[in-house]
Image: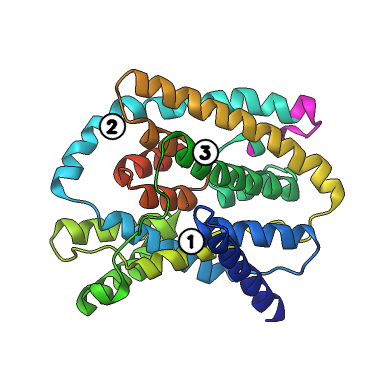
Amino acid sequence: MIRIALTHGIAAIGVLVFHLLSLPLPWLLGPITACLIAALMGAPMKSIPLLNNAMRSILGVAVGATFTTALVISMAGYWTTLLLVPVMVFLIGLIGVPYFQRLWGFDFATSYYSAMPGGLQDMLLFGEEAGGDVRALSLIHATRVLIVVAVLPFVFVFFYDVDMSQPVGEPFASVPVSELLILAAAGIAGWRIAAAVGLFGASILGPLFLAAALSLAGLIHHRPPAEAIQAAQFFIGMSVGTKYAGVTMVEVRTYITAALGFCLVLLVLTFVFAEFIHLAGLAPAMETILAFAPGGQAELTVLALIVGADLAFVVAHHVLRIF
């Protein structure tokens, strides 16, 4: 309990510092940064996985609540860019596996599951079953998520002049109590149903599908309130930072340094694909970057909510990438 309380306190300090310095995404990047620094300094860090997953369900409901009949019809037009997702995943593997195996000396299983930009938990599970180094996989994928999520806000601010401080939803008091209850029920029920059937990303995709159905049926007309989405950012950011708890300098020199080099490859590929798609007139640049950036699904959903991107477009591409 002391470790959990300390971790939450450190994350809260990160939010405060980011607010005071007027840095982007204080509720997400503040906890990530503060917990990362504390973990590297040897602080005993611990989060609550069940609570973290519950917070992810808020994001699923927020995306699902935006679905309308017109939006669902427009999704048929995504096929041209969706076809490019497997191409990008193939290129990532083609570059990533030799990078980790030949340059860093990892075994094949560790190299393969380090390179694959799937869900973090899925890659750890599959990698462990294949005989890979779980600690290496954990740190490499945590670094992938961290770098992608940390870099993109600054790209949007400095190159696309995006206002990252815009509200992500209505205040709590503005959402009717009846809808708050329906939104909460959609999050809990959607998550549990998806987990029961073994759906990957159950804590996000289950609530997303159920909230979308309720929205299309005309039962909900609001997203979760802004305070709930800020809480989701806080816990997701904290969970990313705490993955570095107990890291040693040997691991920093090997696993994390290897991951940083690979993140450069991932970012270059992301911007190359985004530029090609944008120049071909297939999709706006910002939406394409969010859709093809191989970060965490929850973290990129947060960014899409904040910048006002086409949520269905972004989520559809990430679901296909992870699949």
Query: Which dot, 2 or 1, sits closer to the camera?
Result: 1
Q: Residue at x 68, y 75 (%)?
A: 6
Is 112 inside the magenta-drawn segment?
Answer: yes
Spatial distance from mark 2 to mark 3, Cα to Cα? 18 Å
Kindly report the secondary structure that dominates the magenta region of the rendered protein. Answer: helix
Q: Is residue 87 visible?
A: no
Res. 23 image quadrant: bottom right
Residue ID at (41%, 39%): 161
Residue at which label 1 appears: 233
Could you tell me residue 238's position as x and y percent?
59, 63
Query: Which residue, given by chain and number where applicable, does mark 2 sit on?
Result: 78
Above/below status of 176 relative to 316: below
- Whether residue 193 sits left or right of residue 179 in the image: it is right
Task: Give residue 320's position: percent from left, percent from top.
Answer: 41, 38
Residue bearing the label numbered 3:
294
Disc marking residue 210: none
**Horizontal and vertical percent position of residue 38:** 73, 63
Quick one: label 2 or label 1, which is nearer the N terminus?
A: 2
Q: Disc 3 or disc 1, which is closer to the eye?
A: 1
Counting residues from the start of the chain, the first of labels 3 and 1 encountered is 1
Q: Is residue 68 left or right of residue 235?
A: left
- Using the image, determine if residue 137 lies above or below residue 32: above
Q: Is 61 covered by the magenta stretch? A: no
Identified by mark 1, the residue type is: Gln
Of labels 2 and 3, earlier in sequence is 2
Assess disc 1: are there few (<14), some (14-19) or many (≥20) residues with their C-alpha within 10 Å of its C-alpha: many
| Residue 244: quadrant of the picture | bottom right
